[in-house]
Image (cartoon, rainbow, N blue to C red):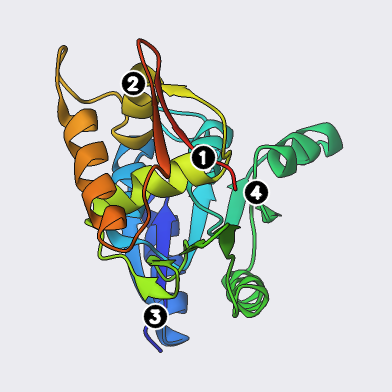
Amino acid sequence: MDQRILLIEDNPDITRVVQYELEQAGYKVLTAPDGVTGLTSARENSPELVILDLGLPDFDGAEIARRLRKTSSVPIIILTAMDAVDRKVNLLEAGADDYMTKPFHPEELVARVKVQLRHQQHGEVISIGALEIHPQKRLCHYNGHEVRLSPKEFDLLTFLARQPGRVYSRAEIEREVWNGELPSNSNVVDVHMANMRAKLRDLDGYGIIRTVRGIGYALKTP
């Protein structure tokens, strides 16, 4: 079993126990002690599922779930010490697929992981005209041909594709795709857009990415 689970948890004891149980079940486990590290790991490793602690030292877990959900449909299971119904509803609205209240039995967590992964067996597909994106598999096709994108190009195209037609400013793109880590006056977004356009153009995908002068970029709707 090659499925990767990302565990974002700042308690080393919980991390150790959960990692052990998941590895015994045959999963590869990636760990992160805080939200920033977790977001970076999710972007770079594309895990099949995320287990997310609510009480992280840098960000609230619900905020991390919202950020993950903007660019990915990866299943998210949240671990929380809070049992209030309205709080659980808020977590689900933030993008969580399931939650467990601490303390919990690791065996039950593994069972819930298996359920979520079964639900994701076929994975999400984003289809916009001739463009087809498989976020979980990190595959992109245009007119039936694979578009060979770099990891950042894939993240960027997926971000635009989730709301086709909407115009995103460079600042929004930098914040969501690069976590706001680009230096001021950087042309990284424009370079990635140009590279994606060239790759799509090679497959007769002319004009898919639209530039709105003075504002930003949008993915054209069919």
Which kind of residue does numbered mark 3 sit on? Answer: Glu
Left or right of 61, for residue 100: right
Instruction: Tell me the quarter of the image containing the N terminus.
Output: bottom left
- Between marks 4 and 1, how big is the CA–CA gap? 29 Å
Q: Earlier in the sequence, mark 2 or mark 3?
A: 3
Res. 198 in view: yes
Q: Quadrant of residue 151?
A: bottom left
Which kind of residue does numbered mark 4 sit on? Answer: Ala
Counting other residues with Cα less than 10 Å from the Cα at mark 4, is it few (<14), some (14-19), or many (20 or more)?
many
Which kind of residue does numbered mark 2 sit on? Answer: Arg
Residue carrying label 2: 170
Left or right of 78, for residue 3: left
Identity of the residue drawn at 29% across and 45% down: 40
For the residue labelled by badge 3, is the local secondary structure a helix, a strand or a loop? helix
In the foreground, 4 or 127: 127
Q: Earlier in the sequence, mark 1 or mark 3?
A: 3
Q: Quadrant of residue 181?
A: top left
Q: Earlier in the sequence, mark 4 or mark 3?
A: 3
What x and y, as percent, mark residue 185? 15, 13
Q: Earlier in the sequence, mark 2 or mark 1?
A: 2
For the residue labelled by badge 4, is the local secondary structure a helix, a strand or a loop? loop
Q: Quadrant of residue 180?
A: top left
Residue carrying label 3: 23
Mark carried by residue 96: 4
In the foreground, 194 or 10: 194
Q: Earlier in the sequence, mark 2 or mark 4?
A: 4
Counting other residues with Cα less than 10 Å from the Cα at mark 2, is it few (<14), some (14-19), or many (20 or more)?
some
- Between marks 2 and 3, how big is the CA–CA gap? 41 Å
What x and y, as percent, mark residue 118? 64, 80
Foreground: disc 4 or disc 3: 4
Identity of the residue drawn at 28% across and 33% down: 178
Residue carrying label 1: 220
